[in-house]
Image (spheres, rainbow, N blue to C red):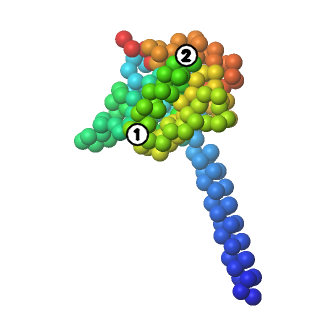
Amino acid sequence: MMYKSRSASSLVIVISFLAAVVLVSWHGRNNRLYTAGTSIITVDSPEKAYFAWEEKKVRGRILLLFGSYPHLTRSSDYEGGLHLTSSNVIEFSVLNNLIRKIYYIIPDDSWEDMVQNTMVQKGIIGSLRRISCMERGMYLYNLLGIPVIATTPTSLPIPSEKVLVYIDHQLFDEVKVRDILSNKGIASDIVISYKAN
């Protein structure tokens, strides 16, 4: 008798756990907001990207960041309260649930330098791990707890959903980025094109 009640209890726990996983997965997918078509928005300061995403009402999205990500360590932009600055636009977007995952794109010819520099800073950045299924891929975790995956254009995986794209023209050529996305079959509904004045 005692074994039957343990088995029943174990079965209830397993079913409850599976139901919770399914519910959370369903909730996450249904709370992602996409826009119809593709918008290419040119901005002259990084924080305007946040306002563009807010205006389009995006939520819980993957970002392909063809630019710099300055806050792999602690941000000091929040002293005195939470506010948006040009250097924390990505972090601020994560805090406001616009972004849930970041692919931080490193030019192919800069990959080895980035890996060496990151390994030297490992104590500062925290947990670093190579991604075995990617030729060039590394998990970088920031303090917000979302995955930040450093990779190169040639190693970029194809996400199963539309992505947000942010292109910093000081680091990447927009035409080349569009070619990369097109050749890989990556769909995007909002492309932010940052061109500094």
Residue at the image point whose x is 51% and y is 19% from the top: 110
* Residue at disc 2, secondary structure: helix
- Return the mark for residue 148: none
Quadrant in which the N terminus appears: bottom right
Does residue 99 lie above or below 172 as drawn? below
Quadrant into which the C terminus falls: top left
Q: Using residue 166 as the reference point, say whether residue 23 is left or right of it.
A: right
Considering depth in this image, is 197 or 14 the residue closer to the camera?
Answer: 14
Write down the residue under mark 1: 123
Name the image quarter holding residue 68: top left
49 lies left or right of 157: left
Q: Nearer the viewer, residue 69 or 100?
A: 69
Q: Position of residue 103 (x, y in %)?
A: 55, 31
Front residue of 144 and 80: 144
The residues bearing labels 2 and 1 have C-alpha atoms spaced at a distance of 25 Å
Q: Earlier in the sequence, mark 2 or mark 1?
A: 2
Q: What's the mark number on residue 109?
A: 2
Q: Amino acid at mark 1?
A: Gly
- Residue 121 percent location from the top left of the image: 41, 33
